[in-house]
Image (tube, grey):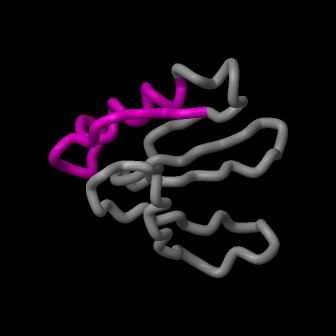
């Protein structure tokens, strides 16, 4: 499943709105919902069924995706940068 979006200039509600909408537009297919995190500077993805959420960056740009740990999940030790996946 592809979820494509362009980030805004800032990591705030306005800058992340397109990404949140893009994820939520696919909720009926993926089961994944997106919302602005508590700090207002990131996105929290949730799968109500508890399924894993796998993310890869297929952008031509050399962007970095940072995935933070969620409290209470075994094996989560903190944020870890992911390398873009080549297309």
How many numbered dots are placed on residues in this image?
A: 0
State the extent of the magenta-drawn residues as a range: 1-24
Instruction: Say left or right for 49 vs 67.
Output: right
Instruction: Say left or right for 52 vs 59.
Output: right
* Residue placed most toward the observer, 40 or 83: 83
The structure residue drawn at horizontal position 66% and vertical position 34%, both measured from the top left corner, is 32
Query: In the image, is residue 82 above or below residue 16?
Result: below
* Residue placed most toward the observer, 5 or 49: 5
Instruction: Say left or right for 40 vs 55.
Output: left
The structure residue drawn at horizontal position 69% and vertical position 22%, both measured from the top left corner, is 29
Q: Quadrant of residue 65?
A: bottom left
| Image coords of residue 44 (percent x, y) | 54, 48
* Residue placed most toward the observer, 71 or 48: 48
Query: In the image, is residue 81 above or below residue 51?
Result: below
| Image coords of residue 82 (percent x, y) | 49, 69
Query: In the image, is residue 27 above or below residue 53?
Result: above
Query: In the image, is residue 44 above or below residue 79?
Result: above
The structure residue drawn at horizontal position 77% and vertical position 36%, both measured from the top left corner, is 48
| Image coords of residue 85 (percent x, y) | 49, 60
């Amino acid at each position: 499943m592809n979820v494509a979006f362009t980030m805004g200039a800032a990591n705030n509600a306005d800058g992340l709105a397109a990404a949140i909408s893009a994820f939520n537009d696919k909720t009926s297919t993926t089961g994944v919902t997106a919302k602005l995190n508590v700090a207002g500077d990131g996105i929290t993805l949730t799968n109500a069924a508890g399924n894993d959420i796998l993310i890869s960056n297929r952008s031509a740009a050399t962007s970095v995706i940072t995935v933070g740990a969620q409290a209470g999940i075994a094996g989560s030790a903190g944020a870890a940068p992911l390398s873009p996946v080549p297309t």
